[in-house]
Amino acid sequence: METLRRIVGDRHVLTRSSELLVYENDALPGYHKRPSLVVLPGTADEVVAVVRALYAAGLQWVARGAGTGLSGGALADDVVLLGLHRLKKIISVDPIARLAVVEPGVVNANLTKAATPFGLHYAPDPSSQTACTIGGNVAENAGGPHCLKYGVTLNHVHAATVVLPDGEIVKLAVPADHEAALDLMGAFVGSEGCFGVALDVTVRLTPNPEGIRTMLADFSSMDDAARATSAIIAAGILPAALELMDDATIAAVEASVYAAGYPTDCAAVLLVEVDGPECGLDDDAAAIAALCRECGARDVRTARDATDRARLWQGRKKAFGAMGRVASHLAVQDAVVPRTRLAPILARISAIGTKYGVHVCNVFHAGDGNLHPNVPYNADDPDENARVHSAMKEIMELCIAEGGTISGEHGVGFDKLPYMEKLFPGDSLDAMCRLRDAFDPLRRANPGKVVPSHACREWISAPGFEA
Amino acid sequence: MSTVLTPSTTDELATIVRESLAAHRSLAVRGAGRWALALTRASGAATPLSMATMSGIVEYVPGDLTLTARAGTTLAEIEGATRANGQWCPLLPWGTDDGTLGATFATATTGPFRAALGAPRDIALGVEFVDGTGSIARGGGRVVKNVAGFDLTRLIVGSWGTLGVITEISMRLRARPALDRTLAVQCDVDDPAVLVRIDAFRRGPYVPLACEVLSAEHAGALGLGAARLVVRVGGNSAFVAESVRRIAELGTIDERAAELWTQYRALDPQQRHFTNAYSSPLAARIKQKFDPHGILNPNVLGEVAV
């Protein structure tokens, strides 16, 4: 600890329980783990020195950005927590190459703000974008509403300097088209803090679209809204975003300070946005509106101006926060299913909610088939807690059985660990463990997350292994 | 030259790898056998392993815009199946369409549509492969967004068969644009000022599907005469009309058939630069974890330093 204080300064090593409390959970309520201590380096050199000191001391650690994760991925259970939010320098913005180099603690929305004067933005836009960091986005391979058209974090990260858990510094980059080389950058994105810490990240910037049309279509049944989603995707129109919110979510949003003017008497709304050059945009918008109406939309309205559009989006982006009004806790899921299967799966999810007497609120990236069936509940009520978790388990098993996956953008972290063995055969989990062990042979970084330890054969056979 | 091994199932391939390990035999993996340079690099004592017979589309639900196929499936077969539904395999790599899906992903080969439609790393959703120990692993899945587990897909795509042999791939598809036009443009591509204007067009907002400045030799081979710029635009009628108006500002335009792109891809102008991918300690550890005895495509991406 003295070594850490020497590296980062006394005030950036936190040990008092009142200080550690802040770092006990991420944005997923319901889990609390207290770190042994918190260290907050302020420069890349300090990060490297801290990682090396922890390596030398034989200590495990967990990296953390802004703590907005939704899978318990940044929980540090009596191990060191390495906070990276002080590294918030935007090192360079190159408008010609459309690239920016940033430190890991740069807030997602601040990067877009820095790119705005050049007519550019950073495309991946998690709903937490006003708080979450680029380093955290890289670790989780974060998504967001506009990833439907523009791609997730993976598609926007070009290069990174990374300190491996043993203190070695490596440069990772997406190979150029003419280069025959391993894509270790691709393997690093989404590694949930288990492969090392990015010291700087080079990301692609995207030109701001010339025009935007944002539409709100409301439906008197969830089934119609889901069918409209499948119809739009199948028609080959690629909206910038295609989001679905059900009546329970709308009620929570409209009762909150984030009220967006969504109709409260409908079963579901679709928020659809198309963007791009002006010529052709109105035709795409008209085609989408027609498909919505064919599928039973009561009304399709288009945002009048930028203010109206921002209001429509605010309700969607703050929906998770608005559910704080409903109950003290919120169970959050992130499954992805084939887009043609949305309607029957949503019906089954609703039935599962009824069966367990829990209130499922759906707010999700419908265009990607990325569901967020959320359940507001009180974790302090043991009976309700048990029912919520049984319902969630059944929903996840349904999504897996339908050919889907357990996480589209939040990561496995701690919360979804039990589902990994249902999704992947043992040999696949073992291969994932081997990849992790190449980056972090001693498993110092984010221990016990993403892949269950007992799925790793080398570790089971190693002396002294405890599951 | 030893006999070519031709597994017909993933399990058969896993058995071949395990037997090869036991016999201290290395394997030179190939699809349609089009990567002459890589095959040369992997030659020597390695036994040829052809994936061409492990072919066929496994699952294709047009409404999902996703497709899963076995590694030996040709690009032509995927092109045929998707075209029937107004869809498009976005790979369109350099080379000919008798190349295989497995080889395209294993070599991460891009093509003239890369900027608009993505590279293999962007198009791949999931992969099944057999590693150098004979173990069968899957990464990713069939849905379009997936962060479950560490990303074996990105690890394997572009690893040139040196970490595992791809047996099956799930990928994204695209809808074919309502209108799709190819234009040859007569303009002086040796004039830097013209290149600046071409670049400005390419950067948008009317982003084309492809925009290629050709060498005189390639233009000749494609029967374009003096036209050295070719552009492909796709979208609805208003978008395409405005795009064509802007392209016409670059020079005299001449409509061509979309087959021009097939011919151009077959010219395969992209030279590959082979690095020694396994010279770093991190990469060497990865190789050690997935192909500890170095039996998969030895030498293709360089060797682990001893």
Image (cartoon, helix red, strand yellow):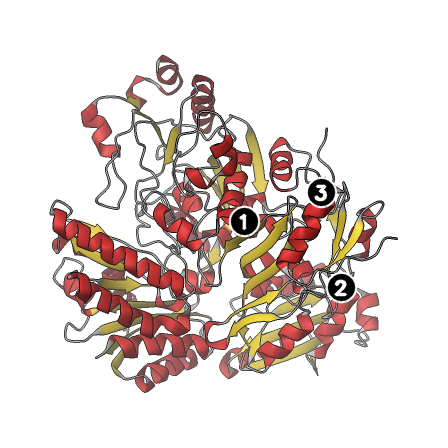
How many marks the image carries: the answer is: 3
The quadrant of the rendering that contains the C terminus of chain A is: top left
For this orientation, the residue located farthest to the right is B1
Q: Residues within 10 Å of mark 3 (few under 14, many from 20)?
A: many
Q: Closer to the camera: disc 3 or disc 1?
A: 3
Q: Amino acid at mark 3?
A: Leu
Q: Residues within 10 Å of mark 1 (few under 14, many from 20)?
A: many
* Chain letter of disc 2 in the image: B
Q: Is residue B136 above or below residue A21?
A: below
Residue B150: image location, x then y, percent:
48, 46
Element under disc 2: loop
For this orientation, the residue located farthest to the top is A2
Q: Is residue A314 above or below residue B136?
A: below
Q: Amino acid at mark 1?
A: Leu
Q: Amino acid at mark 2?
A: Ala
Residue B45 vs residue A164, the one in the foreground: B45
The quadrant of the rendering that contains the N terminus of chain A is: top left
Please tell me which residue is depicted at 62% across the width and 51% down the height of the picture.
B130
Q: Mark 2 vs mark 1: tell me if same chain.
A: yes
Q: Please give the residue where the numbered disc 1 appears in the rendered image.
A: B152
Q: Residues within 10 Å of mark 2 (few under 14, many from 20)?
A: some
Element under disc 1: helix
Q: Mark 3 vs mark 2: tell me if same chain.
A: yes
Q: Which mark is residue B21?
A: 3
Q: Please give the residue where the numbered disc 2 appears in the rendered image.
A: B32
The alpha-carbon separation of the residues under discs 3 and 2 comes to 24 Å
Residue A7 vs residue A88, the one in the foreground: A7
* Chain letter of disc 3 in the image: B
Residue A188: image location, x then y, percent:
51, 43
